[in-house]
Amino acid sequence: MKQVKSGINGLDKVLEGGFLRPSIVLIAGTAGTGKTTMAMQSLFNSARNEEICMYITALSEPIAMINNFMSKFSFYNISLLGKGNVKYVPIDIDIIHRGSEAIIKEMERNIETIKPDRIVIDPVNVFALGEDAESQRQFYYDFFTSMKGWNSLVLLTGEFTQDALINSTLGYMVDGMIYISYEPFYENNIRYLNILKMRGQEFNGGKHSCKINKDGFNVYPRIRAMEMTTVSNERLSTGIKGLDKMIGGGFIKGSSILISGSSGTGKTILGTQFIMDGLLKNEPGIIVSFEEDVEQIRANSNMFNWNLQEFENKKFLKIISPLEYDAYELALQIEETIDEIKAKRLLLDGTGRLQRMLPQYAQLPEYMGTISKILKNKSVTAVYTNETSNLTGATQITGTGISPFLDTVILLRYVEIKSEMRKAISVLKMRGSDHDKEIREIVINKNGAEIKLPFSEYSGLLSGNPIKLATQAFVEAFKK
């Protein structure tokens, strides 16, 4: 047996290499899930790589149908028909009416002539329509006995619910089963792909999100992090005056940093300033923002004389708008961008929005933990921001449960002092390093964020009700 590429974007990662040839794989799902698109994409991409491919269908006008519905996809290349790498074989309705023996004989006649490497039969259900259960079983037995001798990769499409598929005759006869579902998710529907069976090879089971776009069928495998090989002790400057001193000389290279605080406390500014510091040191960066679109990010940064557009033009900076992605598609986009621009720093602004992008089977803390491991393995130092609901007073760090999965947690707060709202910063934790335990003032000026002296005169700052320390109140009382 030989392992061959599937021809489907992302599917080879799920299959850990591709399909086995010869084998028989059923692509199943209900109407509209993308079965034919996946099968045809596999066929045409394989033909482009010099495989001889054959498409067998029971439809009366297959060429017209394919041209009408497939020509919008980039993988569909009609020149491959003229070249002869893709052969269409329609099975006439009269042959279908003559029964299984005539159907199998017609297929084998064409296979003997064409000698294809890869065959698509779309859909396989049609050939047994109208038969009783026993006749269907006999047809599929005869059919599969013949297919085993074709020495090809055979991709069957079939319309099934998942329960019907598990109980079907086809289910135990095929070597592999791929099930595609189309499920509601908030205001949208999302496709999922699930490998139910694949004889003779390892694969990543469970649901993987997928989409159909102009390039055809795309699979976004669930992310998995490799074990860490090395741990860095190198420090990266934050570019924020006073913060490096608070955290022992800068962020640890490859670490994950959460900046949490209520609206307007300066989370985005801190994160962007960190990215800008890297750009000025020839360290490429990525900004992923759920809070603002690209133009707004550029405009806000210009207020601090940070010309992000200049670095975008140099391919040193990439700004990603994630709202068009699902969470696993976004993870893939981030990985590809890191490799493309050799990114060293990343800002993900607005982690709370990620929950709506995750499929129902996934949890945000585990997702964030895996993302942080992937970035750590790539030596990318990542800053994540999270918005809390309370302006002052007691609050959770995130409310999402992600803080235990990250290395450093920085909290930004409003504090009311003498009827004035001021901003405070504190480092709650930093793995692998000592850090400043004091609560300091943070101010935003024309150059960005700057850390000032501690609020040493007050206690109870994080409660939202700061009071003068007893010693300070005593000194002031005797000054009067």
Image (cartoon, rainbow, N blue to C red):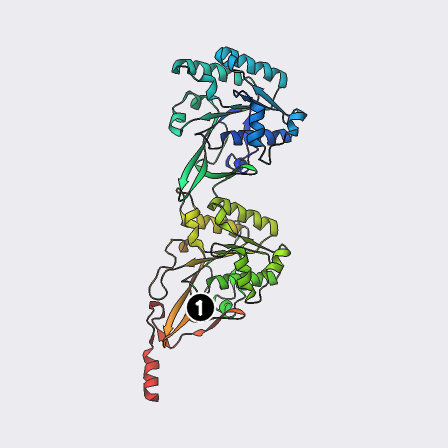
> Where, quadrant-wise, is the C terminus in this rendering?
bottom left
Q: Residue at x 33, y 68 (%)?
A: 463
In front: 335, or 134? Answer: 134
Quarter of the rendering occupied by the N terminus: top right
> Residue 68: x and y, percent?
56, 30
Q: Above or below — where is 361 with respect to 405?
A: above
Mark yes or no: residue 235 visible: no
Q: In this figure, what is the number of numbered marks? A: 1
Q: Is residue 333 visible?
A: yes
* Residue 109: % across, % down: 59, 14
Q: Residue at x 39, y 68 (%)?
A: 414
Q: Which residue, given by chain and number where applicable, does mark 1 sit on?
A: 436
* Residue in the image at 55% along x and 51% along y: 378
Q: Which image quarter: residue 215? A: top right
Q: Amino acid at mark 1?
A: Asp
Using the image as rendered, state which of residue 240 and residue 17 is in the foreground.
Answer: 240
Give SS at disc 1.
loop
Residue under the point 49% across and 66% down: 248
x and y, in percent, of residue 375 in the image: 52, 51
In the image, taking residue 478 as reference, residue 88 lies left or right, namely: right
Q: Residue 360: x and y, percent? A: 39, 42
Res 305 → quadrant: bottom right
Work out whether 105 lies above or below 165: above
Rendered position, 219 above or below 421: above
Few, some or many residues within 10 Å of mark 1 (<14, 14–19, 20+): some
Task: From the viewer's side, name the closer residue of 446 and 411.
Answer: 446
Residue closest to the far right:
83
**Quadrant of residue 390 within the rendered picture:** bottom left
